[in-house]
Image (cartoon, grey):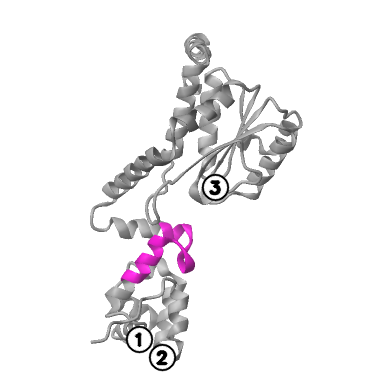
């Protein structure tokens, strides 16, 4: 039996290459698959055929016309496309489905834990103590710190600003002051630091903030994943890390771990400023008389 040609990696290419062989039943099946590839990746051929209103054997015939041994192999191709997260299936829903597909055999919690551990292990290979120190020295020597992230990184920017304030630094979470960005940047100067966070894609607003910082001479630090590594002009210091391979949980633990390392290193080099501020805050919180529910 002759070996089959390699399967194209994008479903659209696969359909185009075999378009002259497709029947009306095939077209109905493909419409169902393309309308909801996430669901198609989880169903067997009989279920997909039922939704398309065609004979159950039609799914097998379609798979073979596309170059697969049967429908399970075609379903595996759809799952692989989800895991790669590109082409026809690049969407948040597809990425979540990919993680569910990958977790089918070993259990969901174990899959998430394995993904987080693997992503954290990768940090050892791409981030050094020198990278951490470059961030912490910049923070120690500045006047004010403006932290800015959008989307998933917004929660981390809020936590970073909170921890820096408790450590005795004048830190502003710009994400909480979106309606006052012009006022915040009007006083930005070359003694300030702008700490940017960006995951998956860099929003236009992050690019604009970077441009303002450069124009005003403020130093920029950037903590990004590999998908959002490109900033122009380049920051003075940047740490770019993988938050997980395609089809794995895109970890927030990884950038949070790096941010924690920076703040810890800052405490090691600021001559007791962080430690004293934390002690003062602890005392104030205990004696302020404010309701504990607020603290």
Q: Which residue is mark 2?
A: 21
Indicate the position of residue 254 as horizontal and vertical percent values: 42, 39
Indicate the position of residue 249 as horizontal and vertical percent values: 38, 49
Say few, some or many: other residues with alpha carbon within 10 Å of mark 2 (under 14 / 14 to 19 / 20 or more): few
Q: Which residues are magenta?
A: 76-95
- 80 in the magenta segment: yes
Indicate the position of residue 56 as horizontal and vertical percent values: 29, 83
Residue placed at 41% from the left, 61% from the top?
84
Compared across the picture, whether 4 is left or right of 281 comes to left
Say few, some or many: other residues with alpha carbon within 10 Å of mark 1 (under 14 / 14 to 19 / 20 or more): some
Q: Which residue is mark 3?
A: 229
Residue placed at 50% from the left, 8% from the top?
287
Q: Tell me which label, 2 or 3, sits earlier in the chain.
A: 2
Estimate the spatial distance between the alpha carbons at disc 2 and disc 3, rounded to whole Å.
Answer: 43 Å
Q: Which residue is mark 1?
A: 65
Q: In the rendered structure, are the residues bearing label 2 and label 1 in contact, judged by CB atoms less than 8 Å apart?
A: yes
Image quadrant of residue 251? top left
Q: Is residue 91 above or below residue 112?
A: below
Compared across the picture, whether 121 is left or right of 231 comes to left
**Which residue is nearer to you in this view: 265 or 165?**
265
Residue placed at 32% from the left, 72% from the top?
75
- 1 in the magenta segment: no
The secondary element bearing badge 1 is classed as: helix
- Find residue 121 and name its label: none
Say few, some or many: other residues with alpha carbon within 10 Å of mark 3 (under 14 / 14 to 19 / 20 or more): some
| Chief SS of the magenta region | helix
Is residue 291 among the parts visible in the rendering?
no
């Amino acid at each position: 039996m002759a070996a089959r040609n390699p399967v194209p990696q994008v479903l659209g290419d696969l359909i185009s290459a075999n378009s002259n062989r497709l029947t009306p039943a095939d077209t109905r099946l493909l419409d169902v698959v393309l309308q909801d590839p996430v669901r198609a990746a989880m169903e067997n051929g009989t279920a997909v055929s039922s939704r398309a209103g065609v004979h159950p054997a039609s799914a097998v015939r379609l798979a073979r016309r596309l170059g697969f041994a049967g429908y399970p192999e075609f379903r595996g191709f759809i799952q692989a496309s989800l895991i790669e997260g590109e082409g026809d299936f690049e969407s948040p829903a597809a990425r979540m489905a990919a993680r569910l597909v990958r977790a089918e055999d070993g259990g969901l919690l174990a899959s998430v834990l394995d993904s987080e551990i693997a992503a954290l292990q990768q940090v050892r290979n791409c981030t050094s103590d020198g990278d951490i120190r470059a961030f912490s020295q910049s923070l120690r020597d500045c006047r004010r710190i403006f932290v800015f992230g959008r989307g998933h990184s917004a929660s981390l920017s809020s936590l970073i600003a909170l921890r820096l304030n408790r450590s005795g630094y004048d830190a502003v979470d710009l994400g909480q002051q979106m309606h006052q960005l012009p006022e915040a940047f009007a006083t930005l100067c070359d003694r300030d630091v702008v700490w940017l966070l960006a995951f998956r894609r860099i929003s236009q607003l992050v690019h604009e903030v970077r441009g303002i910082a450069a124009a005003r001479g403020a130093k920029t630090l950037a903590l990004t994943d590999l998908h959002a590594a490109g900033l122009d002009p380049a920051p003075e210091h940047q740490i770019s890390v993988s938050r997980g391979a395609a089809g794995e949980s895109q970890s927030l633990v990884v950038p949070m771990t790096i941010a924690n390392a920076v703040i810890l290193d800052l405490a090691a080099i600021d001559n007791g400023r962080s430690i004293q501020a934390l002690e003062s805050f602890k005392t104030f919180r205990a004696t302020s008389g404010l309701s504990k529910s607020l603290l």
